[in-house]
Amino acid sequence: MQAQQLTEIANELRIWIIEMLTEAKSGHPGGSLSAIDLVTALFFHEMKGITPEQKSGVPTPGPLPPHRDRFVLSKGHAVPALYAVLAKQGWIAVEELKTLRKTGSRLQGHPDRVRMPIVEASTGSLGQGLSVAQGIALGLKTEHPEARVFCLLGDGETQEGQIWEAAMSAPKFELSNLCAILDSNNGQIDGPVSQVMPLEPIADKWRAFGWHVIEIEGHNMTQIIQALKLSRDLHQQGGKKPVFILAKTIKGKGVSFMENNIAWHGVVPTLAEAEKAIQELKSELKKGGKIHG
Amino acid sequence: MAKATRQAFGESLARLGETYPQIVVLDADLAKSTKSEIFAKKFPSRFYEMGIAEANMIGTAAGLSFTGKLPFLCSFGCFLTGRYDTIRLSAAYSQANIRLVGTHAGVGIGDDGHSQMGLEDISLMRALPTMGVFQPMDARETELIMDYLVKDWKGPAYLRLTRQNLPDLFPKDMPFKPGKLHPIREKINDKATAVTCIATGATVTEAVQASERLAEKGISLSVWNAHSLKPFDEQTVIDLSNVTQQANPPRLWVTVEDHTVIGGLGSCVAETLAKLPQHPPLLKLGVQDLFGESGEPMELYDKHGISAAALATRIQNELKNHR
């Protein structure tokens, strides 16, 4: 799929994110909107073996093939972005998005692999996903060496010590089938990441731990798919290093009044605000989908 | 013959590794102490040295299990349970099919003292939904539990093991019933004052020796072994408490554990007895809301009231209070 088409899908999914969060009356718009371009590129362009089977043109989810690529959402609070992509692919019905965070729903407020196996890992307590992704990559390395594991990290999340334990060990095990992607939106609940607990120089740190680091603009679809292709090539060419994609993003991307405003980390729009947000996103879609990074 | 349950674990793991290629083992720089090195030497490509980084080891093991492997991850019990949030989410909530192996249980490790003793690990692990909690009393029972954990158990489980050697206790002719209490010393006769004791792990042998001392004093201490703290065999406790169906019902219940009495075996039995309208009093012996300390293992057992001698004295004194 081409970059332009992927951008259009991501922008349509931005609308779904706003709709499901407004319906749920709670959740995390800022980090979902910063992540959606990356997650869209993974599921609609890069990852293999994760499209539901089609029966008479209708997506019919069956058992997950063991050789499939995996996606672990370590920043679990951005799960609306993942649910939107899964609904667009047919893993869940679009109607079901309305059940987000409701009693009895499998669309839990944070990812739950038992209720919904396609989410691969239960996350939500930050800092744990990269270790789980590493374990999956280690298991796949012997059984299905072609399969790859992608792990989306929040930047604030990498303040957790467990992240650096995993950062240390993945290069030891030469997990070139593991690709960590940092949604670097510089926002966390108590303020800008750079003030709460500075992380820079991020790229140097991951390089020093033994990762192949690629730096991109995380809303530029061309750059995203090029970086993912490079990570694939490195793996297929017998590279040894795990790959770390540092994606500079904007919290709340696509909705003018949410962009770079930390207040929208874990607060959902009112009905009027949601209407305004959706109007903005729809008019962007009509213009041809380009929301400029 | 006496053997540490950690040693029996390492040998069982290497034995089962031959038949079950899905078994992989992780350790956090304690393979010599946890005895996972026996497996590592035999199957080096299925052993992952994770360094001194337990949380990452737990998450990595969970991920491995999601690809069909059966990971055993090993460290001291206190260090594993110290990474509780990772166990809670990445292992228990995720229903990861992994085996967490915590060695160096209790004050029985001796000299190394407070920071290395697993004293709250059973309580912590029992509190997690989906988690099984097992503790063998000797080498033979370790082998039997290992077979069960590899062949039958699904989901996460915690196995608690000793540093110190323990004498053989498991009767050769007794069938192993996973999850059930097993009788180790039956009531000696129907005339003696009956006391029922449930012990677990290293303290079962102390309870057996205490029963010999007490027999001379006209007290019949029957001893049951709890190898499974979760699921806990509540039904057998209820049956044993049924005073109308026994000629000489127990005057006193006693639990003994090398572990805090808050949330461990004593709590399992107390929670069960509380369901009954009437039951004998319960004496919960173990570490009484205290941290550990350095010392000779048997001196620490005396100090905490869980050696055979201390048990016999405590039980006699307690019976005086319940005339």
Image (spheres, rainbow, N blue to C red):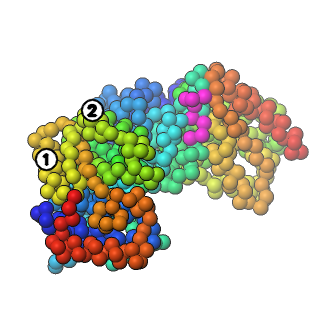
Measured along the vertical axis of the image, is residue A95 above or below residue B31?
A: below
Q: Secondary structure at mark 1?
A: helix
Give the residue drawn at x 42%, y 55%. A124
Query: On the picture, is B41 further left or further right than A233?
Result: right
Q: Is residue B191 magenta?
A: no
Give the residue drawn at x 26%, y 35%. A204
Amino acid marked by disc 1: Leu
Q: Which sits in the foreground, A24 or A174? A: A24
Q: Chain of mark 2?
A: A
Give the residue drawn at x 67%, y 44%. B262
Residue highlighted by disc 2: A208
Measured along the vertical axis of the image, is residue A70 above or below residue A44?
A: above
- Counting the numbered discs, the total is 2
> Which region of the structure is painted magenta?
B114-121
Q: Which sits in the foreground, B136 or A163? A: A163
Say whether residue A79 is visible.
Answer: no
Q: Which mark is residue A230?
A: 1
| CA neighbours of label 2 inside 10 A, class few (<14), some (14 to 19), many (20+) | few
Q: Is residue B118 magenta?
A: yes
Q: Quadrant of residue B204?
A: top right
